[in-house]
Image: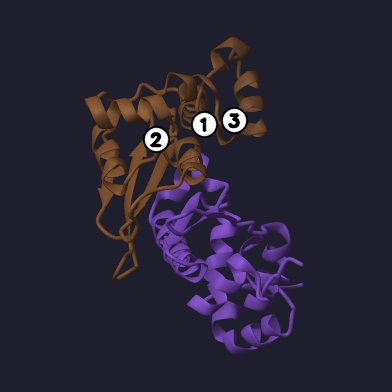
Amino acid sequence: MRTPRPRDLRRFCVVDGRERVADAPGRRVSRHEVWTKGLPDGRTLHTAISKGCDEYGAPLFARLLKSQLQVTAAEFWSAVDKGEPPQRQEVQRSRPRGDALPFALAARLLAGGMAQSELAGLTEAEALRLLRELEHPE
Amino acid sequence: MVRWLMSEARKDFSTLVERASRGEWQLVGRRARDEVVIAGADEIADLLAVAFPFAPEVFVETTGVEIWLPELEVYGQGSTLDAAKDDLIEAALDFVGVWEAGLRSAPNQRQKGGHVRRVQLARDQTRVADVLFGSTPCDPPR
């Protein structure tokens, strides 16, 4: 398995449109570069690049792909080598565990007359907005 | 458990802290609503330790050592295990700062709160190391 160097990770973050956090808040000297990216569904990806490392081992790289980067190895290298931003179709199709609607919120929307099909795929923020419109129409 | 109105708590804050440090949780609020709990930091840390354990994973490579912390999704690297531990502690503290500053509002990051609080309560680097890696070294393999 081809494994990256820190500069590859940095290049990926730039191509992926991530934002660099200058230094972790409250920390005077940070040994890691921190990059974040907000996704359309409300999730935020966090990536840290260790300033002292030369290369990543395969097992660690696999975990970075799955959690911090949320792309396949092919998408990662395509971004690094060809400058192609990843599409993350696979990730966006699957609803993340933390993005479920709270029970009380879903119940109030349904009791207020919303159809179940109208709630499908809503993020919590969208559902809250809908509830406000439903309960306090202008 | 003792309930205090905000105005009473303000007047008698030292009593409230003393009781909390003895293990009696103090609830403070306005009117009938409890808003904050004051409790002993060690007790909270012990409770969180049970609910939010850390299980770091170590990868020994030819070039050095890498440690992955799945609970916070951060890693440390170094030429030795100790160097990788130090790097991971820095990474965890960096993550805690970023999380507190806003990352926690994201639905995929909110769930890390219990583990983040454990690191915050550790106060210094030695205690952070204890929280992340345990205070007793593993027995060497026979």
Q: Nearer the viewer, residue B83 or A130?
A: B83
Mark 3 burial class by Cα count in 10 Å: few <14, some 14-19, many 20+: many
Q: Given the image, what chain letter belongs to the residue carrying mark 2? A: A
Do the residues indicated by labels 3 and 2 lie within the same chain of the protein?
yes
Mark 1 burial class by Cα count in 10 Å: few <14, some 14-19, many 20+: some
Q: In the displayed structure, would residue A80 be above or below residue B141?
A: above
The answer to whether the residue labelled 3 contacts the one labelled 1, judged by CB atoms less than 8 Å apart, is yes
Name the residue: 60% across, 86% down: B12
Secondary structure, mark 3, is loop
Q: Colour of chain A?
A: brown
Alpha-carbon span between mark 1 and mark 2: 38 Å
Image quadrant where one finds the N terminus of chain B: bottom right
The image quadrant that residue B8 belongs to is bottom right
Please state the horizontal and vertical placement of residue A90, each as a whole percent of the image. Answer: 48, 20
Disc ID at residue A77: none
Name the residue: 33% across, 54% down: A54
Is B46 left or right of A40, judged from the image as shown?
right
Alpha-carbon span between mark 3 and mark 2: 39 Å
Q: Which residue is mark 3?
A: A101
Q: Look at the image and tell me whether residue B54 can be seen.
A: yes
Q: In the displayed structure, would residue B93 be above or below residue A84?
A: below
Secondary structure, mark 2, is loop
Can you tell which of label 3 and label 2 is closer to the viewer?
2
Name the residue: 51% across, 40% down: B108
Q: Given the image, what chain letter belongs to the residue carrying mark 3? A: A
Q: Nearer the viewer, residue A76 or B12?
A: A76
Please state the horizontal and vertical placement of residue A87, each as a whole percent of the image. Answer: 36, 21
Q: Colour of chain B?
A: purple
Q: Which residue is mark 2?
A: A2
Disc ID at residue A124: 1
